[in-house]
Image: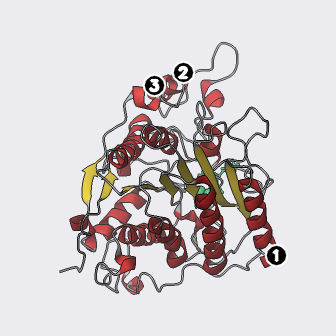
Amino acid sequence: EYGIVRPKGYNVTFHTNPEMEKHHFGQTHPMKPWRLTLSKSLIMSYGMPYAMNNYIARTATYEELNDYHSQDYLDYLGTVLPEPVPRDVDGGTNEMRFNLGGSDCPLFEGLYDYCSMSAGGSLDAARKVCNKESDIAISWGGGLHHAKKMEASGFCYINDIVLAILQLLRCYPRVLYIDIDVHHGDGVEEAFYSTDRVMTCSFHKYDPVSFFPGTGALDDNGPKNEYNPGAHHAINVPLNDGITDEQYGWLFENVIGSIVERFRPSAIALQCGADSLAGDRLGRFNLQVQGHGQCVAFCKKLGLPMILFGGGGYTPRNVARAWTWETAIALGVDKKINPVIPQHTPWREHFRQEELLPTLEQILGDPKPNKNPQKRILEIVQHVQEQLRFVQH
Ligand code: V1S
Ligand code: CA
Ligand code: ZN
C-alpha cells in the first residue's frame, strides 16, 4: 500500500519509548521531547514500521548508567526535584557542582526517568548491533552528546552515546563516532580522549566566544603525548554560518572517507542532530533534508554495522522531516529497494494545511550568507589528512 518493502536479509531496528516524549523542559526551553512524537507519527504514516523491527526502549538501570557516570552524580540526579534544594553546609550547591537547575539543564518532573529512557534506547540499539540482530539500529531519543561523567551540559544529563559505544567496544575492536549536530560533540570526545579504539569526528559551527560549547578547534585532536594512545584520534571540523549541502557533502565524504581508509572502523555510531538544518531555532547552517540525509546514506554505503542517534533539533517540523527521511535511507529507499516514498507529507496535527508540500523538495529556512570560503574547506581536509598520518593502521 505504502510502497515500503522490508529489505531482504537486512535488519533495521527502531528503539523508542513513548513515555520519554511526555517530559517537558519548560515552556521557553528549546528542547521539546514531543518532536520525537512528531517524528514517529510521520515515520508511521509512511508505513515504515512494517519494514523494521520496533522495540519499546527499556529504562537503563543505575548500574548501566554507572558504566560511565559517577555514583555521586547519579545519586543526586535520582533524588533532585524541580524545587530548589537547600544549600550545602560548605556554601556551594550540588546543582552548581553538577551544573543542574540552570536554564540549559533545568530540573523537571521525571528527569531521571527521561534520562534512563534515552540511555535505555541507545543501549538496546547497541546490544542489537552487537548480537548481529541489527544492521542499523535507530535511537532518535538519544544523541545527548554534551553530558559529562559527572556534569550535565547543554540540555544533556546522561551521555547515552558514550554508554552505547562502551557496549559496542565489547564486541567490535574499533568504533568511529561521527557527529553532524551543529554543536561540538565535546562529551563523547572527552570520554574517549585516551583510547585508540574510538575515533571521534564532529562537524560543527565553531566560535570560541559566542557559540556553545566553544570547543572543537581544527587542531584539537586529543592530548598529544607519546604515552597517550588517543592522540590524533579526535577529529574536529569547525565551520562558519551558512554552509550549504554541496560544501558540507563534499567535506563529509572527504573527511569520513579518509578516516575510514586509515582507521578501518568495525562499527559506526552516527549522531544525526537536526539542528544543522536550515531554519533551526538555534543552528546557523543552510543544510537541507537531502544534504543532512546524504551523510547517513554515505555511512550506510560503507556497509558497517551502525547506530543512528538523534540529538539537537529545535524546529520540530524539520526534525521530523529529517529523521523520517533518514529512517527511509536506513531502510534502503535511496537504493530504490523500495518504490519511492509518497511525494506528499501526509496530514498530521502539527503540519499545517498550507504546508502539504513535498517533504523533500521543500526549502528550509531563509538562506543565510555562506561564510565558509572554499580555501578554508580545503585547509580542513588537508589538516585532517595530516592527523591521520599519525594513526596506526
Ligand atoms: N544556542 C543556544 C542556547 N539556547 C539556550 C536556551 C534558550 C532558552 C532557554 F529557556 C534555555 C536555554 N541554551 C543554549 C546553549 C546550549 C545549547 C545546547 C545544544 C544541545 C545539542 O543540540 O547540541 C544537543 C542536544 N547554551 C548556551 O549558549 C549557554 C548560555 C551559555 C547562554 C544561554 N543561557 C540561557 C544559558 C547560558
Ligand atoms: Ca557536531
Ligand atoms: Zn546541537
Task: Measure how far apart labels 3 and 1 are at the Cα level.
Answer: 52 Å
The mark closer to the camera, 2 or 3, is 2
Count how many numbered circles sit on residues in the image.
Answer: 3
Q: Amino acid at mark 2?
A: Asp
Q: Secondary structure at mark 2?
A: helix
What secondary structure is marked by label 3? Answer: helix
64 relative position to 245: left or right: left
Judged left or right of residue 8, residue 185 is right
Residue 266 against residue 356 in the figure, above or below = above
| Residue 183 x/y as whole percent | 64, 56
Considering the image in quadrants, where does the N terminus appear? bottom left
Residue at 49%, 27% (x, y): give it.
74
Tell which of 354 and 169 is nearer to you: 169
**Front tag of 3 and 1:** 1
Ranked by sequence position, the earlier of labels 2 and 3 is 2
- Which SS class for mark 1? helix
Mark 2 → mark 1, Cα distance in angstroms:
48 Å
Can you give x and y, in whole percent of width and height, for residue 53 in the image? 24, 57
Decide which of tag 2 and tag 1 comes sooner along the chain. 2
Q: Which residue, given by chain and number where applicable, does mark 1 sit on?
A: 375
Q: Is residue 365 visible?
A: yes
Residue furthest to the front in view is 393
Q: Residue furthest top?
A: 89
Residue 109 seen by the camera: no
At label 2, counting other C-alpha atoms closer than 10 Å, the crowd grade (few under 14, some 14-19, many 20 or more) is few
Give the x, y percent position of residue 337. 30, 78
Q: Residue at x 31, y 56 (%)?
A: 13
Q: Residue at 39% of width from left, 71% of height from top?
A: 329
Q: Residues within 10 Å of mark 3 (few under 14, many from 20)?
A: few
Report the residue marked by disc 3.
79
Determine whether, in the image, residue 378 is placed left or right of residue 267: right
